[in-house]
Every structure is written in C-alpha cells, then in structure tokens.
Amino acid sequence: MLSAVMLSMLLLPTSASASTLQSNSEHETVSLTSASNSSQVYYQFGIPGGTVGGPAVLKNGVIYVDVRGIAESAGLKMEWDKSGERALFKGWTKSFAVRIGSQNGVLDGKTVALGGSPFKSKEDGIYVPARFIVKAFEGSNLHLDPKTNTLLASDLKTYNVFTETYGGRTYTLIKANGDLYVSQGKDKVLLLTSLQTSFDWAGMQIDKTPGGLLVITITDSFGEPHINTRVVTLVFKNGALLRKATFAYQFRGDADLKPFDDNLLLHDGNTLRFVQDGTGNITATLDLLKLGGKEDDAYYIEAIDNDILLLRGNQKGLLTLIDRKTGKRTLLYEELLTAKDQKYAENNDTPYKGDTLKFVKRSGDKLYFLNDSPLTGKKDLIYTLGQ
C-alpha cells in the first residue's frame, strides 16, 4: 500500500498537505485514498463530446500523463526546441511549455510550478504531472478513484478551431461550441457571435455584398460517415449580427445560391427569406413546405426566378419545378427522363435518393439541365415553360 506521505504527493508537490489538496478550480477537494503500490494507474479526463484516457505513470508519488496526445487532440501543436529538452504546446488562445527535468513551466506566458519533473515518453511525447495538465486545459473536479486507480477530471477545454482570413482580418470558429471571433493584427480578439453548437469538418466562406453587408457561410460535414451537412449563414452589419439561417440536410444540396433581385437569400429548408442588401431588412418570405409539399421534411433551392422556383426534397431528392404565381408543381424527372432513369430516380438510394438532374441555366422560356445518369450516361435536356 502507498504511504500517507506518498498519497499526499500524487497530485501536488511534497510541500502540500493531503487535507488541503485542491483541483484546478480551487473548489473541488481531491480525495486520495490508499492504492496498491504494484497496480497500474490510469487517467480519464472529460473533454467536449467525450473522454480521453489511458495508462498513467506513478513516479516518486506523482501521477504523470503523456500530454502530447491530449494536447494535439485539443488543437495544440507540439514542438521540441533544438536541444530536444523543451516542449512547446501552442494553439488558439492557449500555450504552455515544459522542460525535461524542470519543476517549473510556462502557462499562457506565466511561470508556474508543475508539481513534478517532466520526462520523455517512448513515443517522442513528454510525461507531465497530471495536475498541471488539468490546470492547463482549465479542467475541474480532479480526484482519484481508489477502486480503479483512475485519476479523474472533468470539463477540460479544447482549442480546435477553423480560421479564414478576409479583408486583413482573421475569423476564427471554435470547434467545440461555435463561438466566432474576429481579430486584426495585434488588435484585441472580439467575439462576433456564439452559435452554441459543435462543428466537425467545417469551412468558412466570407463575402461582402455591394451594399456593405458581411456574409459568413459556415459549411460543416458531420456524423459517420459524414453524410450529414449543415450550412449556417450569418449576415452582419457594422459588426452586429442581423440575420442567421441554418439548414441541415442528409443527402445533397450543392447548389450555390446567389443573391437575387438585390436581395440575399436565406433559407433553413422550410422558409426562404429575402434580405435586402444594405439594410438587412426582410422584404419577403416563402413557405417551402407549402410550395414543395409536406411529403418531404425540408427543401433545397437549386434555382429561383421571378416566376419559378426549383426545389429538391431532402428525403426523396426529386427536382421539382414550382410556378410561383399558381403554385403548380412539376416533377421534372417525369417530364425529361427515360423510363429506365425514372425508375432509378424513384428507387435508388446510393449515393443518394432521387434523380440525377442538374440545373444549368435559363434562356427565355427554356430551362437547361444536365442529366448525369449512371445508367444512360450524360445527356443535355431542355424543358420549355408552359408546355
């Protein structure tokens, strides 16, 4: 069994009293009880969306964890200095450095005590006192489970981000919670908005409209095997968020919806809003479920004009022509495709459901499409309005 003195050293320097051991939050008391001297020690830390854990090392009464994997999964990059003795970890708003054999390190620019002496791992990582790791990642509730010899902690933060530069400014999206920041040079980092949702494989597109509105479009692929897509469109004026739209779809929705009639188009699969450039005011709305039919749960817009709308259902995937004046619906696959391709459109679900029609352009009363069929090949098709 470990002695009381050794137990008091598991997480802090030897000068600390076991009765006063505190977690990183300085509010949660670390409860230490006896453990087998020959037992393997483990760790399990709670992070956004799950946990990270594995074997730990008990050395001279201090529990050490290889921090490299934890840091890299949290969005920090690790670099050894030329001597191979000092490891620097750096990421979005977070950095720390430790040196082999030194009981002091640097956390966010300040010198701090580590509570032990780091040493290299066989995987070219570095073992660091577990307590320091929890502190560095702003975790809490650090304690040892005596039944499993597992060091537990919760709420460790991650610093994975997506960045995009536009107009000399850097826009940063926090992967864990959707906080969106902007910075310029050494200026203070400002929070633009908090989307309060996590992102997986995201990218940002940033544009400025002729009327001076800033439009940020975030596209995220999520789930396994990443067949789900979410598009978040944010409209800002003078740094303030005016409009937001989120559309999540499972199968496809790859049309690039351009501004129409001096209006930005925002939709969430159920409602289309026309946003006036310059002011950000809503000038009109369309009920997509009413137009496309409630047989589907959401609709993607593939084209729009003053008199027509091309909608594709998220579930059935069939391209539908809508007459905006009368509300009449026309399933284009029934009008344009061969019997073989029609059957494919109705029954196929790989890689997605529906037809393979793609809108190309409009000229007068004619709509041009490309049908890229796995059965009959590529073919240009024309539909005449009013036929």
Image (cartoon, grey):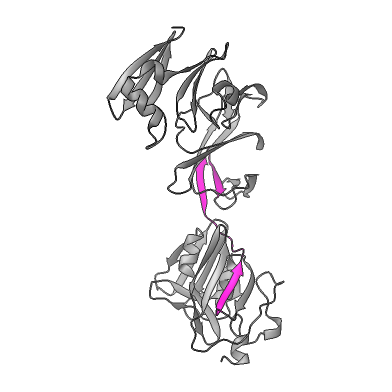
Q: Position of residue 107 (x, y in %)?
A: 58, 68
Q: Quadrant of residue 359?
A: top left
Residue 342, placed above or below residue 95 = above
Q: Does the magenta portion include 168? A: yes
Q: Which residue is at the front of the view, 195 or 294?
A: 294
Q: Is residue 314 left or right of residue 290?
A: left
Q: Which residue is at the front of the view, 248 or 263?
A: 248
Which quarter of the rendered picture does the C terminus lie within?
A: top left
Q: Is residue 304 left or right of residue 124?
A: right
Which quarter of the rendered picture does the N terminus lie within?
A: bottom right
Q: Does the magenta portion include 138? A: no
User: Can residue 7 be seen in this snapshot?
Assistant: yes
Q: Residue at x 61, y 83 (%)?
A: 13
Q: Residue at x 56, y 47 (%)?
A: 173
Residue 194, placed above or below residue 319 = below
Q: Which residue is at the front of the view, 172 or 379?
A: 379
User: Can residue 110 be seen in this snapshot?
Assistant: no
* Magenta stretch, residue numbers: 148-174
